[in-house]
Amino acid sequence: FDDAYLVLAKLPTGSRVPEEARVADLAFRSELRKLICAGDVAKAFTKLRLALTRQDWVAMSESGAFQRLHELRFVEFLRNKQFLEAVRYAREELSAQSARKLLTLVAF
């Protein structure tokens, strides 16, 4: 999941970005990482939805980072023995290739 939260950095690294903004961005990414590591992917998605503009949300939803977060959320459903929810989530949120890969792993 490392690439999932690193991709979320939105601020440029140039010197024109105020130090407070850099610190706030690092704190935000750190909070996302903690949520993801704790298995609370749904809350991480909620925080992202509130923080990103609609245009950024659409762009990020097509990225590999969001796909990885969706895969992690699917796994969390399985860990919590919510099998029907996991299948429903896979059908709605995962790409066909990703869903096949994860469902094949579950079969074993």
Image (cartoon, rainbow, N blue to C red):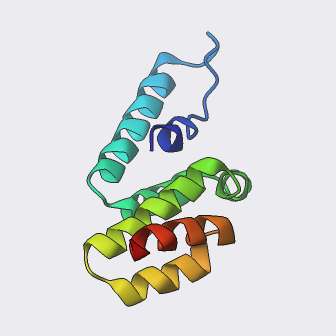
The answer to whether residue 101 is left or right of residue 81 is right
14 relative position to 30: left or right? right
Q: Quadrant of the N terminus?
A: top left
- The spot of residue 100 in percent (x, y) is 59, 71
Picture coordinates of residue 106 (x, y %)?
40, 72
Task: Please name whichever residue, 75 or 5, is drawn nearer the observer in this view of the structure.
Answer: 75
In the rendered image of this protein, does residue 89 appear above or below residue 64? below
Query: In the image, is residue 4 above or below residue 86?
Result: above
The furthest residue to the top: 15
Q: Indicate the position of residue 17 as horizontal and vertical percent values.
A: 60, 19
Position in image of residue 108 (x %, y %): 38, 71
What's the residue at 26%, 80% (across, down)?
A: 81
Q: Is residue 99 left or right of residue 61?
A: left
Res 50 visible:
no
Query: Which residue occupies 58% across, 38% down?
Result: 7
Residue lying at the far front of the rendered structure: 108
User: For the point 59% across and 57% down, which residue is it?
Assistant: 67
Q: Is residue 87 above or below residue 29?
A: below
5 and 18: which is toward the camera: 5
